[in-house]
Image: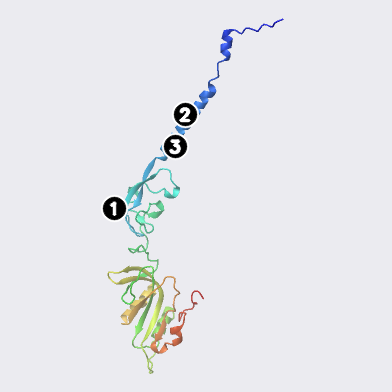
Amino acid sequence: MSTATPVVPLGQALARKKNNPLPAILIVVGLLGAVTLAILGFLESRKSETVVVMVRDVPYGQQISAEDLGTVTVPLHRPAQLAGVSDPATVVGQYAARNLGSNDLLQPSMLMAAPPSQPVYPNGEQLQANMVPVPFATTTIGPLSYHDRVNIGFNDPSGAPDLCDQVRRAADGQPSAMPVVSTGMTRPYACRLLSSVRVLYVDEAANVAYLELTPYQSHTIWALQAAGLQLWGERYGATSMPLAELDRLDIGQVTLGNLEAAGIPGSSAGVPGE
């Protein structure tokens, strides 16, 4: 006995073969969205803006002019430390908060609205509060820069036995003693008055260095000038050990031991490296 195969209507058979188009549509939409985002990201990464840079050196405390500035193009999206300043007009007329060099990318922290409260020299060095600048001839010193220090001394051809000590007592705040007249033989001497004095600025054309001193130290220098005593200076390293001040020496006091010593006579510190 044979079994008859059921006959399916043609319309029903065609309906079964139709696929659901929704997954394909979602895939296409996703691909289009990804491509669109990639294009937008690429276009965003290509965006840029101009920021202000220095085209000339401007020392600390000096006012900035339009001729000091230029602009460069940088990516819109960049590290915060490269944010910079976009409008040159906001920079003109402000003052350098530090030494600015050519090609420096300006940051707001590099600018200040008002000039420094203390005098500033062309090299950017600033006079500290309650200090005074003293011009000092560099003819006895030789080549000098503001990175150096200076030792200052004077010569007394009269050989006054207590002059250097008298200055010492005055510097220590004690009343000055009257010079003592000596009937013995006296020799001219050299007195190192100050050590490791800061150099503010060197005017090479005038052979003058401007030294930073306290008002009393400055007064002492002018008093020595008034007395007609010869001043001299020594170039000294900024990291060198300070020497003893008001250190008196005449030729009769020179000893072979001190001449050949590895250390520094009159210094309270040891020799570096020992």
Say which of 274 and 210 sits in front: 274
Mark closest to the chain's N terminus, 3 or 2 = 2
Q: Amino acid at mark 1?
A: Glu
Which residue is disc 2 drawn over?
32
Q: x, y percentage for residue 11? A: 56, 9
- Disc 3: CA contacts within 10 A as few (<14), some (14-19) or many (>=20): few
| Residue at the extreme left of the image, as rendered | 205
The residue shown at (35%, 51%) is 53
Q: Amino acid at mark 3?
A: Gly
Numbered disc 1: secondary structure: helix
215 lies above or below 66? below
| Residue at the extreme front of the image, as rendered | 1
Say which of 82 and 33 sits in front: 33
CA separation in Å, label 3 and label 1: 37 Å
Which residue is disc 3 drawn over?
41
Mark closest to the chain's N terminus, 1 or 2 = 2
Which residue is disc 1 drawn over?
67
CA separation in Å, label 3 and label 2: 14 Å
Query: Marks 1 and 2: which is nearer the front?
Result: 2
